Image (spheres, rainbow, N blue to C red):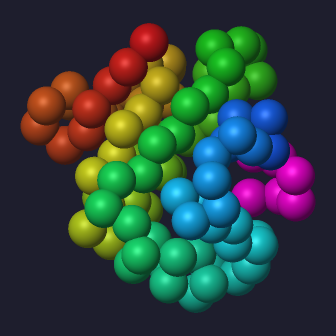
Amino acid sequence: MGNDGQYEDAFGELPPARKSYTRPGSLADYRRFLGTLDVGIAPMIDNPYNRGRSGVKLLVSGSNGVGPVLQSITPYREHAVHGRNAFLFS
């Protein structure tokens, strides 16, 4: 789920049967989208802007039964415990 074309560079080479795209929408749309996932991957570039963001992806994904796999940066390290409520990567 994201902006049109946002993931083309990362997933463009995958065969169509191995990927799908969901347009952004309302919070209800996002929760329906989460219902289709087992794992949610949330990479973020470690920069001043992103360090000021919240760890809401941890809360929203976990509360909807999705295992969060998160970039190990400040917004997530504050509440995510690797191997307990999330998996952190660098």
Left or right: residue 88 versus residue 12 is left
Is residue 5 covered in magenta?
yes
Locate the N terminus by quadrant: bottom right
Q: Position of residue 57 (x, y in %)?
A: 48, 51
Residue 72 appears at what percent x and percent y?
42, 19
Residue at 87% x, 52% y: name it.
5
Q: Total marks drawn? A: 0
Q: Nearer the viewer, residue 46 or 75?
A: 46
- Provide the major secondary structure of the magenta segment: loop
Q: Visible in this render: residue 63?
A: no
Q: Is residue 34 above or below residue 53?
A: below
Taking the image as shown, residue 33 lies to the left or right of residue 81, namely right
Q: Residue at x 59, y 59 (%)?
A: 19
The x and y percentages for residue 29 are 62, 84
Q: Is residue 57 visible?
A: yes
Q: Which residue is located at x 76 percent, y 71 percent?
A: 24
Tell me what residue is drawn at x 88 percent, y 60 percent: 4
Image vertical order of residue 76 relative to residue 33, above or below: above
Is residue 4 highlighted in magenta? yes
> What range is drawn magenta here?
1-7
- In the image as oriented, which residue stretches furthest toward the right? 4
* Image x and y of residue 49, in percent: 76, 23
**Which of 31/2 is in front?**
2
